[in-house]
Amino acid sequence: MLLTDIAVEHTLTPVKGGPRVTLVLHPFTNTQRDSLGKFEIVRGIGEPGGKEVRRSTFVSFQQLAELYAKGVLDEFGFSVRMCPADGKYPTTNPLKKVLPTNIRPGSQFNLAVQGVDVSKPASRELRTALLRTNVKL
């Protein structure tokens, strides 16, 4: 499932030259076992020895809205895995930051973000998912 409420432009530059192509990307849900129907969020983490590694976890629609409403995506530098509407991308689907301008006003996702009570703590399931990325709420 594509979350078309969020749209981010992405310019694809062919490796062997040729014209640049601008695509509109959307977050998509995974189709694999445990992460079925969830969105992948990714964060770069500095490991001992100065090595940068990426850690990812999968969150539901409501959890993604909660993370966005609480500013967690921005605060900890999370990106969301996205793909074009036709689902065809020549390499690994890219990661993109979600900015307020990328969310369609009045959309289901926008309403879900507005409906989040930011004063309540995150659910245990969400906190557990974020531990994979070294984030503690």
Image (cartoon, helix red, strand yellow):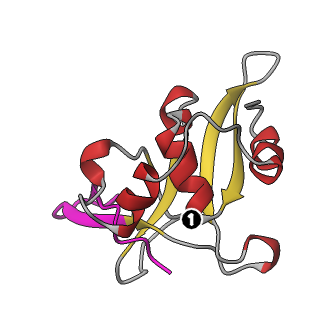
Q: Residue at position x 71%, y 77% from top? A: 36
Per the picture, the main secondary structure of the magenta-coloured stretch is loop
Magenta-tinted stretch: 1-25
Q: Residue at position x 54%, y 64% from top? A: 92
Q: Which quadrant of the figure has residue 5?
A: bottom left
Residue at the spot of label 1: 61
- Give the x, y percent position of residue 35: 74, 70
Q: Residue at position x 49%, y 44% from top? A: 68
Element marked by disc 1: helix
> On the picture, is 132 further left or further right than 93?
right
Farthest residue, direction top: 49
Q: Residue at position x 66%, y 59% from top? A: 59
The answer, for residue 16, to whether it is visible in the render is: yes
Q: Amino acid at mark 1?
A: Phe
Image quadrant containing the C terminus: top right
Q: Is residue 53 above or below residue 9?
A: above
The verdict on residue 41 being magenta is no
- Give the x, y percent position of residue 100: 30, 44
Q: Nearer the viewer, residue 132 or 49?
A: 132
- Give the x, y percent position of residue 84: 36, 72
Q: Which quadrant of the figure has residue 107?
A: bottom left
